[in-house]
Image (cartoon, grey):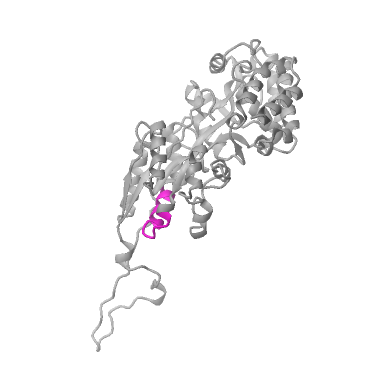
């Protein structure tokens, strides 16, 4: 479901939450004529403690993840595994992580089919997970929480929803993913006395203000890659509730109203004069060179920004109809940590597997993973990250505080319908295409698949 230039930083690391097992100690038996030198106060006795030999029973967990090979978080993950083993000396981790290419993906699925699945798996939550779920090879978050109620409690609910598998249930604990938003040249706004687009009125005010000053308000290539604006205008109009509705006919009004802003913005002078024919890379360079005030793209574009100190990224504001609270974003968490049924049903492994995943998905570890990866959407509210550029930290904070997220439309809309829509955006902006008629054809093409 990835779009042009989209690099999904999927990756992850771990922390040091592993619990230390403590055995009960035996007190010396005093001679009959003597009392014990010191008796433990009643309130300090812990009748629930396990015998040392049971608590320290050796356990080996086989772990497969994408944090291997050339992944930037491979070393981070290995370091947290070592720390986990130090905190849990009875647990040995067999780390079989590797680069998540097609061969790796195929090998994982083959192992599951052969009954050779690992105990903990970091894997995709898209269609690739379907066989794992259908064959009851992985355990749902709901089932795990019935015994471990705090499991994944630090993860943003929106991120958990985004990481649902095909059956609508949650199985994987995500760490970080991608996000999209409005990149703004903050210094241009300040120099021209224009407010950042934190609400719809300010967005339209910024378009008008920069157009009057001869500065391109929005760098966009409507005839090449209008993807990001399509989904952001639909999100601004209908919020995640309508943006995520795959029955386009049921939310036709939202689509029509959202797409209608292409013409309104164009009439206001929002886009470059050659927006219908220019290339996405050229308008991105225009934004980077301070020749445009705003640019819509994703977290994969953060590294290309040469002035991260004076660039910010903001969520698309709501058009004002009450369906979007102004913090909803396009974002995706398409992988996460699973506990397999094989480990869950093994009394010797269940507790260790839960502790391992919890240790690898703490808020602190997630913050470290995002930092090492250079950005991305954290699955928990990590606050301000000191290791990121100001722009990377801004994007991470935006994603971490999102009240709701939804993935890109091209991830589910039928390809003929999506390609047809892409080809009509420039015409909608110019007024030569009717948004309602375009949406009707999108519905027809999508239904035909």
Residue 101 shows in the view: no
Where's the C terminus, which quadrant?
top right
Q: As drawn, which residue projects farthest toward the bottom?
A: 33
Image height check: is 294 above or below 325? Answer: above
Q: Residue at x 44, y 31 (%)?
A: 374
Residue 13 picture location, percent across and down = 40, 41
Q: Does the magenta stretch include residue 352?
A: yes
Q: What stretch is highlighted in magenta?
A: 343-359
Q: Nearer the viewer, residue 405 or 22?
A: 405
Q: Does residue 42 appear left or right of residue 130 in this picture? A: left
Q: Give left or right: position of 56 versus 304.
A: left
Tell me the chief SS of the magenta region. helix
Q: Where does residue 160 sit, x and y in percent of width and height?
A: 55, 44
Who is closer to the viewer here, 220 or 389?
220
Horizontal placement of 54 versus 448: left or right?
A: left
Task: Provide residue 204's location: percent of width, then percent of height.
Answer: 71, 24
Image quarter for residue 196? top right
Residue 236's x, y, as percent?
Answer: 68, 32
């Amino acid at each position: 479901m990835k779009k042009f230039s989209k690099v999904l930083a999927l990756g992850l690391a771990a922390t040091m939450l592993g619990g230390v097992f403590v055995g009960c100690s035996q007190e010396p038996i005093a001679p009959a004529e003597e009392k014990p030198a010191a008796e433990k106060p009643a309130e300090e006795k812990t009748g629930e403690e396990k015998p040392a030999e049971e608590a320290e029973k050796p356990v080996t967990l086989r772990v497969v993840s994408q944090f291997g090979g050339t992944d930037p978080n491979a070393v981070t993950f290995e370091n947290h595994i070592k720390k986990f083993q130090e905190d849990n000396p009875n647990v040995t981790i067999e780390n079989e992580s590797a680069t998540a290419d097609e061969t790796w993906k195929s090998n994982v699925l083959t192992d599951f089919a052969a009954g050779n699945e690992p105990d903990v798996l970091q894997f995709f939550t898209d269609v690739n997970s379907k066989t794992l779920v259908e064959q009851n090879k992985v355990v749902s978050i709901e089932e795990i929480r019935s015994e471990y109620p705090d499991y994944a409690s630090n993860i943003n609910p929106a991120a958990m929803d985004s990481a649902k598998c095909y059956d609508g249930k949650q199985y994987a604990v995500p760490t970080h993913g991608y996000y999209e938003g409005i990149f703004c040249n903050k210094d241009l706004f300040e120099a021209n006395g224009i407010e950042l687009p934190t609400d719809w009125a300010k967005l339209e005010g910024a378009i008008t203000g920069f157009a009057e000053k001869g500065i391109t308000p929005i760098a966009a290539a409507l005839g090449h890659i209008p993807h990001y604006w399509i989904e952001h205008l639909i999100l601004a109009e209908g919020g995640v509730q309508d943006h995520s509705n795959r029955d386009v006919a049921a939310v036709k009004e939202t689509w029509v109203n959202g797409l209608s802003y292409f013409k309104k913005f164009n009439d206001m002078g929002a886009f470059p004069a050659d927006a219908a024919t220019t290339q996405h890379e050229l308008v991105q360079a225009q934004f980077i060179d301070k020749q445009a005030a705003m640019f819509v793209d994703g977290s994969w574009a953060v590294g290309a920004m040469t002035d991260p100190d004076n660039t910010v990224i903001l969520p698309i504001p709501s058009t004002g109809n009450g369906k979007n609270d102004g913090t909803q974003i396009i974002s995706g968490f398409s992988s996460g940590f699973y506990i397999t049924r094989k480990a869950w049903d093994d009394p010797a492994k269940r507790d260790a597997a839960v502790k391992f995943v919890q240790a690898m998905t703490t808020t602190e570890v997630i913050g470290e993973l995002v930092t090492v990866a250079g950005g991305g959407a954290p699955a928990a509210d990590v606050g301000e990250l000191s290791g990121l550029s100001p722009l990377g930290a801004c994007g991470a904070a935006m994603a971490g505080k999102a009240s709701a997220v939804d993935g890109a439309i091209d991830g589910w809309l039928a390809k003929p319908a999506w390609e047809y829509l892409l080809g009509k955006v420039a015409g909608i902006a110019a007024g030569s295409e009717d948004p309602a008629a375009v949406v009707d054809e999108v519905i027809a093409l999508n239904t035909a698949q």
